[in-house]
Image (tube, rainbow, N blue to C red):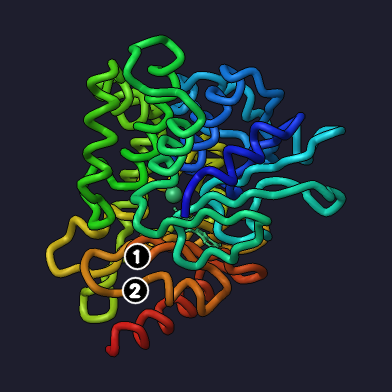
Amino acid sequence: MNFKAIKEEILKSKRIGLSFHASPDGDAIGSILALLNALRYLGKDSYIISRDVISDNFSFLSLSNEIDGNTPGPKMNTDLVIVLDCGNADRISADLDNYNGKIINIDHHISNEKYGFINYVDVNAAATCEISYLLIKELGIEFNNKTDIEIAIGSAVYTGIVTDTGSFRHSNVTSRTHEIASKLIELGVDNSKVHTSLFDNKPFNKVKLMGSVLSNIELVLDNKVAVLQIPKGMLEDFNLINTDTSDLSSVGLGIKGVEVSMLLKEVKDGVKGSLRSKNNVDVRKVAEVYGGGGHIKAAGVMLKGVDIIEAKEKLLNALKEEMHL
Ligand code: 5GP
Ligand code: MN
């Protein structure tokens, strides 16, 4: 895989839309904003296509205000759409049904469906942001001039790396991950500011919600699986409708002996399950049983038309099988 073909397509395109997966996380947001800042700097007519809005803790990133949910599909005359951090065509946060132009798919999920006309899928990248960084270098931004634009792009890249690696904790981290982070810090990216903005910036009620969820945590399947639940109405009760809750998914892994932490969140049309694994349990396989996906140690699934009790039962059955219990 190399970036030459992608670079050529970018250079010859007149108008470029950028999109990512629905309910974008730090890596999706970081990789799209890194590329948007770079393309604008290079003088390309480029913009974000997103049905989603993002939570406030990402507002420190340059151009994050453009992820406002107001451009759900490609604008007129768009000849290239680049999708970042999204493995499945039906999870793209964009209405592409009437779009006839080219799609480039840039991602790091094993389960990627290769839905693009060019597919750059590097499963060894800890974050799609690693790929964005390398692509942006190929586009001619060198990351050694300590300019404001380089630092803005670098902060977005650093954000995706930090969020997709659990702050450099997960086994997806490689020496390249640290090399890129090292270059970014040398450049002037303020790592402490990024961490504080992302993680030490919660609404007071969010911490109270965490308390409530934690006080109801359960251990099941020989105490190897921790279950955390956000039932219908709970977010409203705490006045937290659009708040990201993904930081709760892995909390159960902090418990001695727990292999899998599962967060169940009741939403409008069903239940969103988020699974995190400490060692060898492949939670992607569990999510795939019900049409979800992700990575071996972090996966998600949307169970439509069920309540939280049924969703829990379904996912625990699949986990039981996968864990040979
Ligand atoms: P999360 O649990 O934080 O939503 O997602 C964990 C990982 O699983 C991420 O890499 C995310 O892209 C992926 N993921 C989450 N939900 C789904 C889903 O419904 N389908 C697929 N294919 N992947 C998902
Ligand atoms: Mn990612």
Q: Residue at x 35, y 32 (%)?
A: 158
Q: Quadrant of residue 18?
A: top right
Quick one: 140 or 241, which is closer to the camera? 140
Residue found at the far top of this picture: 147
The yes-or-no answer for disc 1 within 8 Å of ligand 1 is no
Q: Mark 1 or mark 2: name the one nearer the start of the chain.
A: 1
Q: Residues within 10 Å of mark 1 (few under 14, many from 20)?
A: many
> Which dot, 1 or 2, sits closer to the camera?
2
Q: Which residue is mark 2?
A: 282
* Percent x, y of residue 155: 38, 24
Q: How many marks?
A: 2
Tell me which residue sits at (40%, 32%) in the image. Answer: 157
Q: Does residue 13 lie above or below 306 as drawn?
A: above
* Circle 1 residue: 227
Q: Is residue 193 left or right of residue 169?
A: right
- Amino acid identity at mark 2: Asp
Depth order, front residue of 128/183? 183
Left or right, residue 73 beside residue 35: right
Q: Residues within 10 Å of mark 2 (few under 14, many from 20)?
A: many
Q: CA distance from mark 1 to mark 2?
A: 17 Å
Q: Secondary structure at mark 1?
A: strand
Which circle marks residue 218 in the picture?
none
- The amino acid pointed to by label 1 is Val
User: What SS does tag 2 mark?
Assistant: loop
34 displayed left or right of 282:
right
Q: Position of residue 270 (x, y in %)?
A: 62, 63
Q: Residue at x 37, y 88 (%)?
A: 321
The C terminus: image quadrant: bottom left
- Residue 128 image point, x, y percent: 44, 46
Residue at 70%, 41% in the rendered image: 51
